[in-house]
Image (cartoon, rainbow, N blue to C red):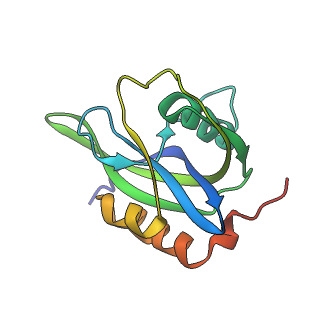
Amino acid sequence: MQKKKLYLQYAALPFRKERGELFVMLVTSRETKRWVLPKGWPEKDLKPYQVAETEAFEEAGLKGDVAKTPIAAFEYGKVIDAKRTVKCLVDVFPLNVRRELDHWPEQHQRQRAWMRPEDAAAAVAEKGLKRLLLAFAADPSQADFAD
């Protein structure tokens, strides 16, 4: 039995703390309009955390401080076209949001929304991402990083 190839992606977990309460930002995917984290494929000249940081800017208009090591990973099936889905492993890097831009590259292709992590977990379809968001809600200290 041949194993299915696992493709690697890198995601940002954008977060902010407001009056002691934790919020995360989700964006909609371009094709299916599901709520997801900003994420993308590896890029030759960028480190994994830099890819996550770039995707947060391009997909959600966010700037901030990104962790250099992932806090978690999850798997999901990425729809490539009507006949093909590939299995992806996504390494997730927290991004402490410092600025939310009014204009960004993919603003006309996606929606973005701040949510409590529990609400974000209810909004996403991927089981692994749900677990990750609930774990983040239970232990927000995962986002306390110093580089």
Compared to residue 64, the image places residue 16 above or below, namely: below
Q: Where is residue 7 in the image (x, y as percent from the top left)?
A: 44, 45
Whether residue 45 sits left or right of residue 57 in the image: it is right
Whether residue 102 sits left or right of residue 95 in the image: it is left
Q: Is residue 138 visible?
A: yes
Q: Where is residue 14 in the image (x, y as percent from the top left)?
A: 58, 50
Residue farthest along the front direction in this orientation:
19
Q: Pick the quarter of the image with the N terminus.
A: bottom left
Q: Which of these two is toward me, 11 or 47?
A: 11
Q: Residue at x 30, y 55 (%)?
A: 2
Compared to residue 82, the image places residue 125 above or below, namely: below
Q: How many labels does the image show?
A: 0
Residue farthest along the right direction in this orientation:
147
Compared to residue 69, the image places residue 144 above or below, namely: below
Q: Which of these two is toward me, 8 or 32?
A: 32
Compared to residue 41, the image places residue 93 above or below, namely: below
Whether residue 108 sits left or right of residue 90 in the image: it is left
Q: Position of residue 109 (x, y in %)?
A: 35, 26
Q: Is residue 87 visible?
A: no
Whether residue 34 sits left or right of residue 104 in the image: it is left
Residue farthest along the left direction in this orientation:
82
Residue farthest along the bottom direction in this orientation:
138
Q: Which of these two is toward me, 71 or 6?
A: 71
Q: Residue at x 64, y 27 (%)?
A: 44
Q: Which residue is drawn at 39% across and 48% down?
A: 36
Q: Where is residue 42 in the image (x, y as percent from the top left)?
A: 56, 35
